Amino acid sequence: MLCIHSSNSDATGVMHGLKWAHQRHKMRRKIDMSDLLTTEDERYAALFDVANEARKIGNVVDVDLNLRMNELRNQATVQKGSLIELLGMPPRPHMFTTERQGYTLFSFEACEMAFRDVKTFSSHVWRESPGIMSLGPVILRMDSPEHKAHRATIQPMFIQPRTATWWRQNWIQEIVDTLLDQFKIGGRAELNLQFCARVPMHTVARGIGIPSGNALDFRDHLLRSLDAVHGEKQNHSPEGQRASMQWISDTLTALVTRRREEPGDDVVTGLIKATLAMPGEEPRPLTDQEITAACKLVILAGGGTTWRQLGILIWGLLTDYKQWEACRDDRSLIESAVDESLRWNATDPIFPRLTTRDIEVDGVLIPEGSRVDICLGAANRDPTRWDNPDQFDIFRPKQAHLGFAIGEHQCLGMNVAKQEMIVSLNGLMDRFPNMHLDPDLPAPQLIGGLEQRGMSSIPVVFA
């Protein structure tokens, strides 16, 4: 990993660089877009290596996770113990500050119930997570009415049809086209790093208002700042980690300040214009802290989960090539393929919650104050809901899955993520209709940690 030198003067320089990059972007858009094609920067390999990501967090899974989750679900749909404990993995004390009894839900019915019953299964569990708390007042850690009010300020920018127009036309299509321009018929590529990692990272950065030229710097500093919270040593000093936290704060504060003076066509401008309407309070604008917190969450989640899921989707189609050909010949199937990839192998197969009262689920009493793992990975392969659930099958009858969660806390950016994957697949199939996995290189493997599954690589031949 490249070492980024961070100091107060560096942070100031970065803010000036961000402003200059924005001005340069306005003058010559393609100069900014050229950053997407940079392959020499070692940070792409460091930041988008699924195995390395899992090692840093300390949750490497060296067994077939789906097989083990299926076995646990078949033993009992609700079990005492966290999923980590039930899988026999070592504890991770840095994840939560409070020690609690754990329980895990495995069936689709139990998991769906927990996602929908937000009064009993509270998202306040994230208030015991140092990493999430370091982001600021993000909706991930809120329950309603606070959650509903804050989500309403940002949700309009992430719903259909705006994602198919505003997001797609402003950013997604151009980013995908620019990346595909580097590939040629008869050539080879490793799509995980050269394509999948870049589409969402640059999309969410530019959607927020950060030029593509700063997107990689931003993600690097954001992940380093979370290392500081976790107390991890990743070949850089605690001082450097704290400097990264300051870099993120300075960069976003500068962006918000500039957008207050010069509104743009981006998420930050939308948040500045939004009104927070909390019950019993006078409606008010969002504070700078609330705006920057929302931006950090969108960039952290949007730049990470979609990258891994897009790789899983491409792997699924190329491994069962008849399904690639079916989508290529009938593009209306692509959205079904996206949803099937999320059911079959969601990149994040577990969500925690905190119980606010005693509740019995499938005959098991879960006491108030328990930490409950919703194992959507097992729920999405529940044989009582799907036939042959372990198979990737884009033709199966449509049913709701839990890949994006469900209910009040359903993924805010799910429609943007879907558009990124749909546009990416259409672009690949338009230009390289007979693309296939490279037979001269090792086959892709689904690897990673408990909360972030992804591909080891996706080597392809363009044909």
Image (cartoon, rainbow, N blue to C red):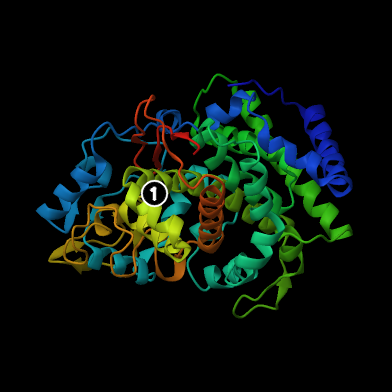
The quarter of the rendered structure image containing the N terminus is top right
Residue 368 screen position, x and y as percent? 28, 62
Name the residue beneath numbered marker 1: 348
Where, by quadrant of the figure, is residue 148 drawn? bottom right
**Could you tell me if residue 374 is visible in this image?**
no
From the viewer's perspective, tell me whether residue 83 is left or right of residue 204: left
* Relative horizontal placement of residue 27, taking residue 214 as reference (left or right): right
Number of numbered tags placed on the structure image:
1
Residue at x 68% of width, y 54% of height: 171
With respect to residue 454, does 296 lie above or below?
Answer: below
Q: Residues within 10 Å of mark 1 (few under 14, many from 20)?
A: many
Residue 178 appearing in the image: yes
Position of residue 226 in the picture relative to residue 380 (left or right):
right
Kindly state the secondary structure of the residue where label 1 is placed: loop
Identity of the residue drawn at 64% across and 54% down: 172
Place residue 326 in its image quadrant.
Answer: bottom left
In front here: 320 or 33?
320
Q: What amino acid is at disc 1?
A: Asp
Q: Residue furthest left?
A: 75
| Quarter-of-image position of residue 97 | top left
x and y, in percent, of residue 377 in the image: 29, 52
Residue at image x 88%, y 58%?
Answer: 262
In the image, residue 295 lies at what x, y percent? 65, 53
Pick the residue in front: 324 or 14.
324
Provide residue 210's location: percent of width, then percent of height: 73, 47
Residue sitting at x 59%, y 20%: 236
